[in-house]
């Protein structure tokens, strides 16, 4: 009999669920805020339905999903569920391995919580809810967002602080978006027949990262100890001089807890523009002459190009550039800006194909160009499902 399992992917502002029978996805639910309301969009093979829900149903989403699965006759009772898989974003060697969640796992996760509360907190709350509805006997798989980056070599892994501190504190660059990178790399291999040797993956959503993939393995990535490092993101700061952090702490009179919120929620595109974290809105503002919105977009592209160059140097060239995430999939203008002046790396965008392609998997490189450019929709849920099923 096919296993029946639920996949859970929590964010700070939304939650996604998918129910599988074996390898087949039969139900999805996306919980999010729209204005001041909580909404859920449920999808089955019969179509989609969006409805407004109470805050308690957002917090206890697993209960709503169970009721819905029974009501839709996908399962007859909660005991029909075999296992649950949860995406985990947490720093630490322990979390470089996908594992079944037990008491030791929860203890390690609670210890890691202070390092990434905005990312790990929602997942731990979800695990508590799962246990509340299913009891302690339900197997729960912790699917790490960093496992794909476990192959990063030491030279790319460590910060230049005393090595004994790195080792004693477990302080190193773990990288994130690994589930997404794994997803698009697998899809690229299917599309092209084989995966090229030197691949750069740009995951460009609210969070954003660039990863160098050599012979199918991650050898460097832009995110570090936490998901704050690297690119300019929607509201995250990305790279910043440690001296500037100390200066900000003094001048803004913020302690480190307050700075954590500042760097995660008030910076990036939102901070630079002073108006929005949404690239679509910023492009509109730029068109209407808003200088700070134009600066935010220019800084975003500048930092991203710098990381593409860095990854190309580490790989010794680039055979394939993959653009994924909302910006990579849907922003024709930003794809054009990202790829411009990268001809020296063999990256040549076909303007006509780019202008005609929105929200689809497509090859954007000019015919005959040395480096292929692919837009690939990431499917984290599918990847989490595969790993959960295997566990």
Image (spheres, rainbow, N blue to C red):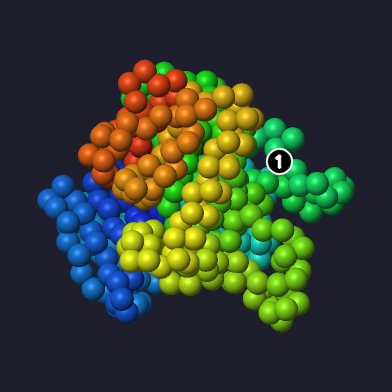
Residue at 62% across, 37% down? 310
Seen in the picture, residue 11 relative to 179 is either above or below; the reply is: below
Farthest-out residue, bottom: 253
Farthest-out residue, front: 289
Residue 158, percent from left and from top: 75, 43
Q: Please state which of residues 10 and 154 is positioned toward the viewer in this rendering.
A: 154
Asked if residue 330 lies left or right of residue 251, the reply is left
Residue at 23% across, 73% down? 52
| Residue tagged 1 | 157
Q: Please state which of residues 304 and 171 is positioned toward the viewer in this rendering.
A: 304
Q: Is residue 338 visible?
A: yes
Q: For mark 1, give the secondary structure.
A: helix
Asked if residue 154 lies left or right of residue 204, the reply is right
Res. 239 image quadrant? bottom right
Asked if residue 360 lies left or right of residue 223, the reply is left
Residue 365, percent from left and from top: 36, 28
Residue 243, percent from left and from top: 77, 63
Seen in the picture, residue 17 relative to 121 is either above or below; the reply is: above
Crowd rating for badge 1 (residues with CA inside 10 Å; few <14, some 14–19, many 20+): many
Q: Is residue 95 visible?
A: no
Residue at 63% across, 69% down? 260
Res. 236 image quadrant? bottom right
Residue 261, percent from left and from top: 59, 71
Count every numbered label the image shows and give the total. Answer: 1
- Image quarter in which the N terminus is found: top left
Farthest-out residue, left: 46
Residue at 44% across, 60% down? 294
Asked if residue 67 lies left or right of residue 185, the reply is left
Seen in the picture, residue 290 relative to 1 is either above or below; the reply is: below
């Amino acid at each position: 009999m096919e296993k029946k399992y639920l996949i859970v992917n929590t964010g700070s502002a939304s939650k996604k669920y998918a129910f599988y029978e074996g390898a087949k996805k039969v139900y999805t639910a996306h919980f999010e805020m729209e204005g001041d309301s909580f909404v859920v969009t449920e999808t089955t093979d019969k179509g989609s339905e969006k409805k407004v829900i109470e805050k308690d149903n957002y917090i206890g989403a697993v209960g709503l999903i169970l009721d819905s699965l029974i009501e839709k006759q996908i399962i007859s009772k909660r005991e029909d569920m075999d296992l649950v898989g949860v995406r985990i974003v947490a720093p630490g060697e322990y979390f470089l391995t996908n594992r079944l969640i037990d008491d030791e796992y929860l203890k390690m996760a609670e210890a890691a919580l202070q390092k990434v509360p905005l990312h790990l907190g929602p997942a731990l709350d979800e695990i508590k809810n799962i246990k509340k509805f299913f009891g302690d006997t339900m197997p729960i798989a912790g699917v790490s967002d960093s496992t794909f980056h476990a192959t990063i070599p030491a030279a790319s892994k460590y910060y230049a602080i005393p090595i004994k501190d790195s080792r004693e504190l477990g302080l190193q660059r773990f990288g994130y978006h690994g589930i997404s990178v794994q997803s698009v790399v697998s899809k690229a291999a299917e599309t092209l027949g084989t995966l090229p040797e030197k691949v750069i993956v740009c995951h460009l959503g609210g969070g954003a990262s660039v990863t160098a993939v050599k012979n199918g393995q991650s050898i460097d990535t832009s995110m570090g100890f936490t998901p704050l490092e690297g690119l300019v993101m929607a509201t995250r700061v990305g790279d910043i001089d440690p001296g500037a952090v100390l200066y900000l702490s003094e001048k803004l009179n913020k302690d480190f807890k307050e700075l954590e919120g500042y760097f995660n929620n008030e910076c990036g595109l939102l901070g630079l523009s002073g108006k929005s974290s949404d690239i679509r809105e910023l492009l509109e503002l730029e068109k209407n002459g808003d200088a700070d919105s134009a600066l935010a977009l220019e800084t975003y592209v500048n930092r991203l190009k710098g990381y593409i160059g860095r990854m190309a140097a580490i790989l010794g060239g680039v055979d394939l550039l993959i653009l994924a995430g909302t910006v990579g999939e849907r922003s024709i203008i930003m794809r054009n800006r990202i790829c411009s002046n990268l001809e020296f790396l063999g990256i040549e965008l076909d303007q006509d194909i780019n202008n005609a392609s929105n929200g689809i998997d497509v090859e954007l490189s000019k015919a005959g160009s040395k480096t292929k450019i692919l837009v690939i929709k990431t499917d984290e849920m599918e990847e989490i499902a595969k790993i959960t099923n295997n566990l």
